[in-house]
Image: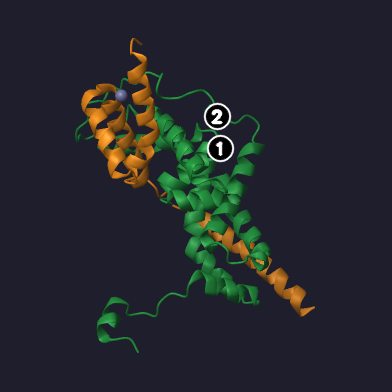
Chain colours: A orange, B green
Amino acid sequence: MTDNSNECIECNELLELLVDYLDGEATEEVRHRIIIHLQDCPRCTRLFWSMRRTVSYCQMESCCDMPSLVHQRLWEALSQELEAEDNQTDA
Amino acid sequence: MASSKQLQVAPKALPVPDRELVKRVQAGNAEAFEELVRRYERKVYNIAYRLLGNHQDASEALQDTFLRAYRAIDKFQFKSSFFTWLYRIATNTSLTKLRKRKSPPVISLDEPVGEHHDLRLEIPDYKYSPEKMMKQREMRQALQDAVDSLAPDYRSVVVLRDLEGLSNEEVSKVLNLSVSAVKSRLHRGRLVLREKLAGYL
Ligand SMILES: [Zn+2]
């Protein structure tokens, strides 16, 4: 890498701020700084877009299907527990 | 009585709030607990599955979570929402299980990630194609593999925040972390996911 240190600090800073920016929680001032930086820094721009794709993919892909057997087992375990409790209270 | 306009929006009775159900359970009503299970079993399962990466372990963690919650519900003091409390049990149960595994397939995140890594990214010119469905399945697997590769502390943050859609605030409550710690773990976790998924997105 041949970046001068100034640019590195800027890029590092940007990385720190990216979480808020991607989540739409950055302040106006931070957003402005990020946009200015991205205009001049192709490397961060690439990073930004790939992060953004990653995050939206994750958010879209949230649900895995719960197999019905899993549901069944859970309820069996629960009814045992609840019955055991009942018996204790009755005794 | 509600106005007819409201009735159109909500024709059925409003669902009983979680905290009301918890109070009923605490008063000895087991059916109220069953309602809570119905409300949250899928979400808890998702968290466990994402953290553990397979249905067998996730199924066990799901059972343990609700059994623990039932046994501990008398101590619930309404200082947080029921779901953050429940998700905390789910996360702890899953992470304990994860740590007990013999050789966890974990990438250390103590090394700096990102900035000095190779930031170049080759984006495949991926358009709609007959292979799209297969690609999607591959991607799903790649996502789970990427999540599996995260160290537990990062994995829990990424799962709750990005996959389960909790806010930073809520994640910080579930995991007992500061919001800034959540953000920094989230950032590092996302950098890893991004690298692993680069070929797919
Ligand atoms: Zn930059």
Q: Residue furthest right?
A: A91
Question: Which of disc 1 and disc 2 is earlier in sequence?
Answer: 2
- Chain hosting mark 1: B
Label 2: few (<14), some (14–19) or many (≥20) C-alpha neighbours in 10 Å: few
Which quarter of the figure is the N terminus of chain B placed in?
A: bottom left
Q: Chain of mark 2?
A: B
Helix, strand or loop under label 1: helix
The relative height of residue A63 versus residue A36 in the rendered view (above or below) is below
Disc 2 residue: CB within 8 Å of ligand 1: no
Label at residue B152: 1
User: What amino acid is found at the position of numbered circle 2 in the picture?
Assistant: Val
Specify whether residue B197 is in view: no
Provide the residue designation for mark 2: B106
User: At 63% from the left edge and 54% from the top edge, which residue is drawn?
Assistant: B64
**Which residue type carries mark 1?**
Pro
The quadrant where ligand 1 appears is top left
Q: Which mark is residue B165?
A: none
Relative vertical location of residue B153 with respect to residue B66 in this rendering, above or below: above
In what quadrant of the picture does the C terminus of chain B appear? top left
Please identify the quarter of the rendering in which residue A49 is found.
top left
A17 with respect to B79 (left or right): left
Residue B37 seen in the figure: yes
Q: Furthest residue to the top? A: A2
Element assignment for label 2: loop
| Residue under the point 54% across and 52% down | B174
Image location (x, y in percent) of residue A29: 29, 40
Q: Position of residue B63 (x, y in %)?
A: 60, 56
How many marks the image carries: the answer is 2
**Residue B6 in the image, given as x and y percentages of width and height:** 29, 81
Contact? badges 2 and 1 (CB < 8 Å): yes
